[in-house]
Amino acid sequence: MSNTSHKNQKRDEYRAAKHKAEGEGLPAGLPQKKYYRQRAHSNPFSDHQLEYPESPEAMDWSSHYPMFTGKKAERNADLHEERKGNAKRLDREVEIADIGCGYGGLLFALAPKMPETLILGLEIRISVAKFVQEKIKALRQQGNSPRPPSSPSKETAKTPVADTSSPSSSSVPGGYQNIACLRANTMKFLPNFFHRHQLRAIFLCFPDPHFKARKHKARIVSSSLNSEYAYVLRPGGKVYTITDVEDLHEWMVERLGSHPSFERVSREEEEEGEGQDELVGVMRRETEEGKKVERNGGKKFVAVFRRVEDPSWPVRRLQGKVPGNDTALSERKVGSESSTIKDDGE
Amino acid sequence: MVFQCILSCARDHPTRLSSHLLAASGPNIYTMSWDFEEVISVWPEQPPSDKEDVKGKDAVAPPTKKRKIANEQKRPNVIKLLCTRDEKNIVAVTAEDKCIRVFNLKENGKLEQLSERCMPKRPNAVAISPDETTLLVGDKFGDVYALPLLESAEEEEPTTQPTITAMSDVRAKPFKPTANPLTVHSGSNRKALASQLQVKEHVKTKEPLKFRHELLLGHVSMLTDLAVMLVDDDDGNIREYIITADRDEHIRISRGRPQAHIIEGYCLGHKQFISKLRLPAPNLLVSAGGENEIYVWDWLAGRLLRKIDIGPALRDFRASWKASPGIREGDRNEDDQCEDQQTAISGLWIGLPGSSQEKLIVTCEGVPALIYIQVSSLTDYDTPRVHTVPLLGNVLDVTVMSDLVVAAIDNIHQPWSTSALHSPDEQPPLLQLLKFEQFLYESVTEVDTGAFRLSDQVSSKPSAPPDNEAEQDVHVDRDFWELVYHVEKLRKRGGMGDEG
Ligand SMILES: C[S@@+](CC[C@H](N)C(=O)[O-])C[C@H]1O[C@@H](n2cnc3c(N)ncnc32)[C@H](O)[C@@H]1O
């Protein structure tokens, strides 16, 4: 116990010092992961003190993607009558979501590959999300400062950024302005962040496997959650999944593959290579979990699903049999019949 | 004894002569004649208490009073009643056994049980589909199932389409450990593997439900209410929608069967849990819960039209209540709420249904009043007026029979309190009957509380259960309390498991 409190103290000191340095205008160093670790599981069913917008329109993205606010964005704001408050508008919307992004490896790898696309990591563990936010901040500052400070620890030397890009992010396309991370429980609050058909890609990388059957309901793929993924994805958009747990892979293939809103892409499309979906390759290589698996010589299972168009509504004629009504129905009548039923619902 | 649940079987009935009133108290359902003159039947059937010599093998109706009380505690409490438009079928939901029971309501008021289906999780919200073939059942864990209202002849082939079958829960495969040392790379995974290998025989996977059911959709939150709505799409087609509300402030709009997996939109904006949904017109949705504000939506567009704050009306009402003579000290000092406390809205109903004078009736937990708003004013330019009508005690449930409103009253707790008890000599009636005058607009006198006030005769009728002695024994235990006051407890306390 004293060990933990000692650790906590160290961590608090570290974060306070870091905060102070930044307050004094010193360039942010890259955060050290060891001060941001958190127990592996966070119960997605409990009432965390989460912050989430009451609706996507109420979300202020400007602090997360400050370089994407501007003239064009303001014009869009005028067009958008639903706008609440006077938060600054972005000139574009988030299009890619990394659900359960962990320490953000995928975000940092994707950022320079698609600098014009806004990418968002969502992570339920508060310290882990904080780490990603700090790291984004540090990388953005390094990009702005003429001489980036050298990496403060060996921890950062291991980060994917150091591996995949030059140490100075000033040369990195987009300068990490297009990525952000939020602390969120996506199992409950996805529709608070994204409106219908907003996204073009959702990543589910190495989701927590929740081996025990009793815990399966905590899995991030289920028939009912898939309906929400389908809601925020535009037709043609994709869900990318990767795991090292074969059973979880089968589970995801079963659940997503059988959901009427999704179809699995061809196996070639799930491979890396010339002319193939670049995102698959990045996902295979760049997440922290993926690297661990790699180091341990584990196997990775990939499955990608395309969101299909919604079918047309089933045809049901008004003249058809609506029990309890043999007379022609006026619209009003239809309503009162149904609200009758609701009355019973008490 | 209180009635936690009441249901008039013919709210829209033009004459209301043929209708019954059903009222549930604990595990029992009483059928009353339309004029409330008498209790004409009780479910489950209870033998007259003078036949004490009959040695009871019948667990449901034990012969002696003591046994009876002991048994009542074990029998599941009724938490919801609903019925079909023709008044023939009654649906009752019970809490502890998570069961849905469907009954035939006979001419003589007797309830004949047709089926009993126990759900995997406690059903919180139940609706009958517009075509009255199907029950939609939303549970505590957020799932919504469709069950046939009446179970048809045994081996009728399932009519579900393949896509829908795919949506229903896939039965768990036989258990085998799925982690191996290679896949296990984190400490917690290692632990999971270790525990898996230990467990030789996996704990029995949930027994599959033995009746026809179909998982339609799910929220990762407690489902609190649901509605099914038919809407004309202008081309002479009708579209069925399912509207579901949860404890995490969401209202979801899904397509009706067989496309219930398609989410059409959300109505977002609530800042607290939602407890009730009501549709006064096909395109108008009203929702309420842990806030003083009632939300009015153009739900098809996912657009909030307005919020109506009932807080000021409640405060005025409370102030006048406290100022009125004859209020005892106890009532006055009793848990004075701070000014801006949020109420827990427990119910929304439509009074004078089908008339041009429709009212939206609102009830709040622990508040001795009916609050109402003219439905036509919900979409008016001007701020709608909020009216309050005092009741003799906290309102527990409401049911509407054309121009009448029946309110079930808490005669155990003092008005405005969910903890302070009444003194034994002071007992308000169990039911109060109010009448909306059709042709008076915006006038408080349209509610006549005097003429239709029910006395506690209901409980003094010979066929009525627990007599007074038995009642004295009933202390207000936790289970009972939760049976009647369960809305406020939906509020999030915050701070739980934040770092965990
Ligand atoms: C095994 S990690 C994988 C991290 C990262 N995707 C990777 O591949 O390196 C799974 C992550 O999902 C997060 N997570 C689990 N449930 C979540 C939820 N409901 N909402 C957001 N994040 C969640 C966990 O906190 C954890 O960081």
Image (cartoon, coloured by chain):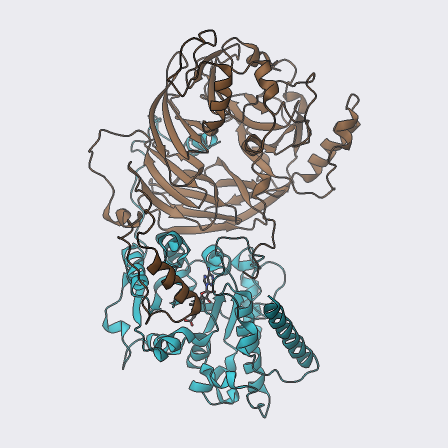
Give above or below for A260 relative to B415: below
Ligand 1 found in image quarter: bottom left
Residue B307, how many percent across, how many down? 61, 44
The quadrant in which the N terminus of chain B is found is top right
Q: Residue at x 19, y 33 (%)?
A: B155
**Residue B432 in sight:** no
**Residue A343 in sight:** yes
Q: Which residue is the extreme one toward the top? A: B50
Q: Residue at x 43, y 41 (%)?
A: B139
Q: Which chain is brown?
A: B
Q: How many marks?
A: 0
Give above or below for A136 relative to B368: below
Residue A235, how many percent across, how many down? 34, 61
Task: Name the foreground residue: A274 vs A14.
Answer: A14
Q: Which chain is cyan?
A: A
A344 vs B466, left or right, is: left
Residue B240, how many percent across, how many down? 37, 41
Task: Name the foreground residue: B215 vs B500.
Answer: B500
Q: Residue at x 65, y 25 (%)?
A: B393
Residue B242 in which image quadrant:
top left
B70 vs A29, left or right, is: left
Q: Which residue is the extreme one toward the bottom? A: A147
Give above or below for B401 relative to B463: below
B65 vs A289, left or right, is: right
Task: Name the foreground residue: B227 vs B51.
Answer: B51
A83 vs A40, left or right, is: right
Residue B264, how many percent across, how many down? 41, 51
Residue B176 in which image quadrant:
bottom left
